[in-house]
Image: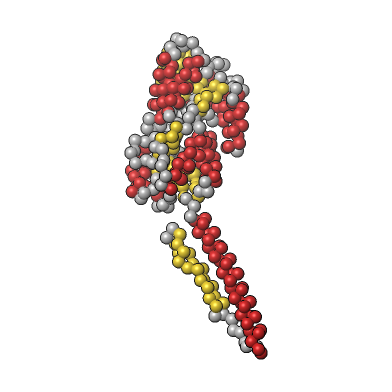
Amino acid sequence: MICYSVADQHDAGKVFSIQFSLDRSIAPYEGGERVMKKRWMVSLVCIIVLAALIGFGVTFLKENDKPKVVIVVKAFDKDYWRIFEAGAEKAFADFDIDGKVIAPDSEYPPTKQNNILKKVLRQNPDALIVAPVEPSTSIPILMEYHKKHIPVLLADTEAEWKDQTAYIGTDHPTLGKIAGELLGSMLQPGDQVALISGTAFGSIMSDRIKGAREALEAAGIEIVTEQQGYDGFGNMKSVMENILQTYPDIKGVFATTDALALAALKVIEEKGLKIPVIGTDGTMNMVKFIESGRLSGTVSQNPYDIGYLSVQQALKAIKGEAVRKRIDSGVDIITEDNAREKLDFLKKTVD
């Protein structure tokens, strides 16, 4: 009997073993020459098979040695998160990471995302990246990751949690300020504007409103109303029609999300009016309106960069390298001059 074995190679607590044997009875031949030749051939076959099995084992172990990164975002019902996912997938490929991006079927209620976070915790990833829907309810779950020494990076949405590894995303007060300055540049001092805010847990929307208000007031623009664009269940409300009825002299609108901006624009166009509307996300539909001349401009976050940079920083954390606690992904201003370029990028990314 000739027997070779490869055993006790471990990966993530599992034992990988390969064992084979060859039992061959060899009758003696005259002079012993044929016996030796046949034994040599049998040994050669065993060596070849053993080499193949070892090669398979090495490949198996190498695949399972890749860093495992899980990203949990808010939902995939908006272009923003699909663009984010494309950036993350590019980083997975560039850095040879075993990664995935998952999300609940909708943002609301926030318990949907928290249930996913609990499930991922049981999978013991090497790092977690999360865009929390409601940070205050997610933090107790994220603390369990921290107890297991799993780096937790927040993307897009900040939280008041001292143990987060890093935040990668937009500086939201700056985003609001740039949006307010852009809208103010399209108006005259004394003109009236409306601010429409989305519902978000934490300070994102209020930070954007605050930045826009400061910039508009500095430009001498009058803010006549601030409205909530969503109800308590995350459903969009028809606020623009009421705003136009109550404040018929409105000359501009700032909305804290593109979805709200596009809803406002729809009502404005139905009324046959030409009023600038500024959003914040730089989604495909918003950019199309700018390219066609139906809007003058908007501001845009960089979800592709947020996705990519989050994965890059997660890998650093896994390796024990220094990670910056806060990375600002920047804000773009989109006008008719660069709308085509932005649109081409978005189509290539999302399609």
Examine the rendered structure and indicate whether residue 316 appears above or below residue 340: below
Quarter of the C terminus within the rendering: top right
Report whether residue 6 is seen: yes
User: Residue 162 vs residue 256: left or right?
Assistant: left
- Horizontal and vertical percent position of residue 105: 48, 41
Count numbered badges in the picture: 0
Report whether residue 196 is seen: no
Location of residue 39 by image quarter: bottom right
Q: Nearer the viewer, residue 292 or 48?
A: 48
Instruction: Tell me the residue at 53%/35% (across/down).
Output: 79
- Horizontal and vertical percent position of residue 58: 53, 61
Instruction: Tell me the residue at 61%/73% (across/down).
Output: 45
Q: Looking at this view, name the residue that lies furthest to the bottom.
A: 30
Location of residue 143 by image quarter: top left
- Horizontal and vertical percent position of residue 286: 55, 27
Instruction: Tell me the residue at 60%/28% (across/down).
Output: 341
- Horizontal and vertical percent position of residue 324: 41, 38
Instruction: Tell me the residue at 47%/32% (across/down).
Output: 329
State the colouring used for the structure image.
secondary structure
Quarter of the N terminus within the rendering: bottom right
